[in-house]
Image: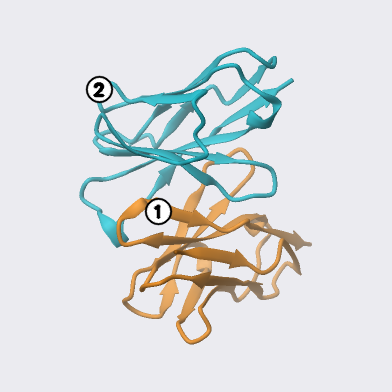
Amino acid sequence: DTGVSQNPRHKITKRGQNVTFRCDPISEHNRLYWYRQTLGQGPEFLTYFQNEAQLEKSRLLSDRFSAERPKGSFSTLEIQRTEQGDSAMYLCASSSKFETGSNEKLFFGSGTQLSVL
Amino acid sequence: AQSVTQLDSHVSVSEGTPVLLRCNYSSSYSPSLFWYVQHPNKGLQLLLKYTSAATLVKGINGFEAEFKKSETSFHLTKPSAHMSDAAEYFCVVSGRTGGFKTIFGAGTRLFVKA
């Protein structure tokens, strides 16, 4: 068990460019979450997958954001036409199918820090 | 609806003195409550969780938290601070349906002075 892995750790891009982040959850964790954390704030929920199905999306997730988890393992988060307001830490978390509801425990990756110039 | 408020944006203590990080919550039903810690350049790590069993919850690294329903509080404490405790701490409330209803507080930055 190597924990949740996120790549890249840092991404600097120019406004208007597209970026893609990758998350590898703990193996056999069937649930995967994306959060966004801005400076001085706690993480905010963006979207959630159970296996390959995207079951929930926050209103924070504009049309420029898309997330996939094609084989129910790793996930990607793409931001198109980036804006300066997209600058944030993007966190991925996963949880086990054996812990549900109030027993669910989230395991977080170290995040991808996005800077949009 | 659920919400969580961390009452201090930053707390400064001396090494060896007690730590108190305050958290109030709001929930229309019995919540699950968590404390996470975030060290620089590291992922969020679960310190402890409350899920309606014992009201005093013990976590890792000597931290504990007490659930007080009458005060809607879930404060995090540690008897004696260590330099390695310096980090950002998040109080978290989660609904019965689990992670996607998880709401994080704004965080409390803990500074530990030598």
Residue type at mark 1 is Lys
Residue located beneath label 1 in the image:
B101
Q: Is residue B83 left or right of residue B47?
A: right
Residue type at mark 2 is Lys
Query: Relative to the observer, which residue lies in front, B111 or B21?
Result: B21
Chain to which mark 1 belongs: B
**Cα–Cα gap, marks 1 and 2:** 24 Å
Image quarter in which the C terminus of chain A is found: top right
Residue located beneath label 2 in the image:
A71
User: Could you tell me how many numbered marks the image carries?
Assistant: 2
Q: Which residue is rendered at x = 63% and y = 29% of the image?
A: A86
Q: Which residue is rendered at x = 52% and y = 42% of the image?
A: B43
Mark in front: 1 vs 2: 1
Examine the image and state in which quarter residue B6 appears.
bottom right
Question: Dot 1: what SS?
Answer: strand
Q: Can you say whether B24 is above or below A114 in the image?
A: below
